[in-house]
Image (tube, grey):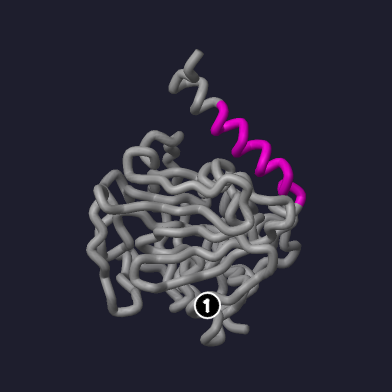
Amino acid sequence: MAESDAEKLQRIVEARMKLRDRHLKRIESSPARSDPNPLGSGERNRHGMPRLPPGQHLTKSWPVLDLGVKPEVSTSAWRLTVDGAVDAPVTLDWAAFQALPQVKDDSDFHCVTTWSLMDSTWTGVPVSTVLALAQPKAEATHLMTYAADGYTTNLPIEEALKDDVLLVHAWNGQPLTKEHGGPVRMITPQLYAWKGAKWINRIELLTKDRPGFWEVRGYSMTAHPWRDDRYS
């Protein structure tokens, strides 16, 4: 008997939770969850860190930063491939991406250039969901994300599996614009924002860490805002 849509979604959710559970100890011990002496100021966020990391100032607008190229990527042409150290490489088109379980989450956005945008509402798919579809191998420790403008950035798998790390297609109820990485970008609220690629089109699972575009140029491999962890 063919699998129903509800059964398929339930299977995806179960695979995601199984993958998260496998890395849960490392997720919970990450700096943004467990740092005993976080830097920063203001009220605490939901993970116990100060809302405003050190060296940051608040902005009410969302500045646009990129490599000087804003690629035109239509939803009909958009694809996301997850490959590398996985057992089941997968490529999603827009319809398959939209059919995955969608979430809405509020979080803050911290740019290494010293501004922070608070209280954004994001709509999208947890990165952990698409990783679960591809079934990362046990030896996968990091991932590299790729963008349509040639940008790349790395992060540990335990950071990518956090519930607020999303592949977003909407910001504050509106479709994500081209300037901000639409149709889909990654957000990493517990790391500096350069760890989330705009115009994302590929996620490669790695068995050892590898620097991306800014990391090669001297930026931190780890990018923890509450440690002022900007540069290597």
Asked whether 55 falls inside the magenta stretch, the response is no
Q: Position of residue 157 (x, y in %)?
A: 64, 57
Residue identifier under label 1: 55
Instruction: Check disc 1: other Cα within 10 Å, few if <14, some if 14-19, many if 20+.
Output: some
Point 47% across, 52% down: residue: 107
Q: Position of residue 188 (x, y in %)?
A: 51, 59
- Judging depth in this view, the residue of 181 and 107 nearest the camera is 181
Chain part drawn in magenta: 11-25
Principal secondary structure, stretch drawn in magenta: helix
Report how many numbered discs are placed on residues in the image: 1
Asked whether 17 falls inside the magenta stretch, the response is yes
Residue 65 lies, with reference to residue 129, above or below; the image says below
Query: Tag 1, which secondary structure?
Result: loop
Q: Quadrant of residue 15?
A: top right
Point 46% across, 57% down: residue: 187
Q: Amino acid at mark 1?
A: Gly
Q: Position of residue 51 (x, y in %)?
A: 53, 60
- Judging depth in this view, the residue of 39 and 171 nearest the camera is 171
Residue farthest along the bottom direction in this orientation: 217
Does 232 sit left or right of 80 as displayed? right
Does 232 sit left or right of 26 as displayed? left
* Quadrant where the image shows the C terminus: bottom right
Q: Quadrant of residue 135?
A: top right
Residue 124 lies, with reference to residue 210, above or below; the image says above
- Judging depth in this view, the residue of 105 and 119 nearest the camera is 105
Q: Position of residue 34 (x, y in %)?
A: 72, 57
Residue 107 lies, with reference to residue 153, above or below; the image says above
Q: Quadrant of residue 43?
A: bottom right
Point 34% across, 74% down: residue: 65
